[in-house]
Image (cartoon, rainbow, N blue to C red):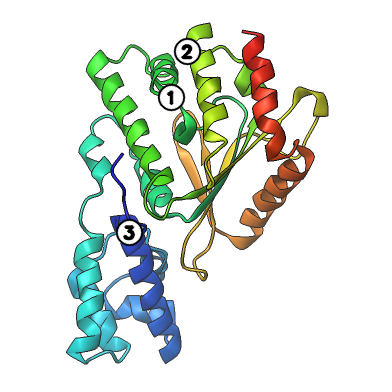
Amino acid sequence: MTSTQPGGGPTVRRILLGSQLRRLREKKGISREDAGYHIRASESKISRMELGRVSFKGRDVEDLLTLYGVTDSDEREPLLALVREANRPGWWHGYGDVLPNWFQPFIGLEEAAALIRTYELQFVPGLLQTEEYARAVIVQGSAGDPPDVIERRVNVRMNRQKVLYRESPLRLWVVIDEAALCRPIGGPKVMRGQLEHLIALCALPNLTLQVMPFAFGAHAAEGGAFTILRFPESDLPDVVYLEQLTGAVYMDKREEVDIYARAMNRLTVDSPPPAATPELLNRIVAQL
């Protein structure tokens, strides 16, 4: 797999640019409403820009920099260069014809994140799937889509996994419900290969893998699967991602994120420690 540097994708460029614009605005004591008025936009657009959720127009950034008192060309040019980099399409945009619009932002956030914590109860998480397992999952949910579409979606899933192997790899903390590991997706051969792959992945220093066992009973995440993404910039909010059949929810309000963070913390405490995971996986393999 080719390595990618953290911060190399357009999503993290937008996040970095947005955070710098926010700092400049706050330093001048200018409200989001006044900043929006200055560029003929709304307060909510300024908020989305500062969170890196939208693309940037060069003219808007130039006008905001002037409003914020950044007039020296040596100070302006690095920020305007970020605009150009942030607007370059990510690698996943080449698969836009086979990906739902609501999922594409997640790929960018995933690439930009420094730490991802996730709980899954239905499937092995996409970043840990084998190609055969991924294909079986995608076929099941694709409602008769042609083989070339299936393969392109599989390619996306495999490409996403590069974040685990880049020079400064993503740190990933996963809790998988035992139900997901006992569900024979793709048949016994595919499932065996997937479980053996997970056992091998336990050796990765940037991966922490735990299993929430049946025997524990009710637990902190009975509401369903979720993912929490944290970014390199410490002042950027964590984002919670919830996926549904026809869309996804992205949450960054502190009070909402904290609820999921507490659930994740509880899961990691209540599940057997990571050192016990290979043995548990081997027991499931032996039952296939």
Q: Is residue 42 visible?
A: no
Q: Which mark is residue 54?
A: 3
Q: Which mark is residue 130?
A: 1
- Would you identify the image quadrant in which residue 82 lies? bottom left
- Would you identify the image quadrant in which residue 215 lies? top right
- Locate residue 181, reporting x and y percent: 61, 21
**Rounded to the nearest whole Å, what is the CA distance between mark 1 and mark 3?**
33 Å
Q: Nearer the viewer, residue 202 or 132?
A: 202
- Amino acid at dot 3: Val
- Amino acid at dot 2: Val
**Rounded to the nearest whole Å, what is the CA distance between mark 2 and mark 1?**
9 Å
Indicate left or right for 189 with 104 as reference: right
Residue at 36% of width from left, 42% of height from top?
162
- Find numbered disc 1 in the image and state the secondary structure of the residue it sits on: loop
Q: Nearer the viewer, residue 93 or 100?
A: 93
- Locate residue 257, reporting x and y percent: 62, 55
Q: Which residue is mark 2?
A: 190
Q: Which mark is residue 209?
A: none
Dividing the image into 4 quarters, which one contains the N terminus? top left
- Locate residue 15, reporting x and y percent: 38, 64
> Which sits earlier in the primary sequence, circle 2 or circle 3?
3
- Find numbered disc 2 in the image and state the secondary structure of the residue it sits on: helix
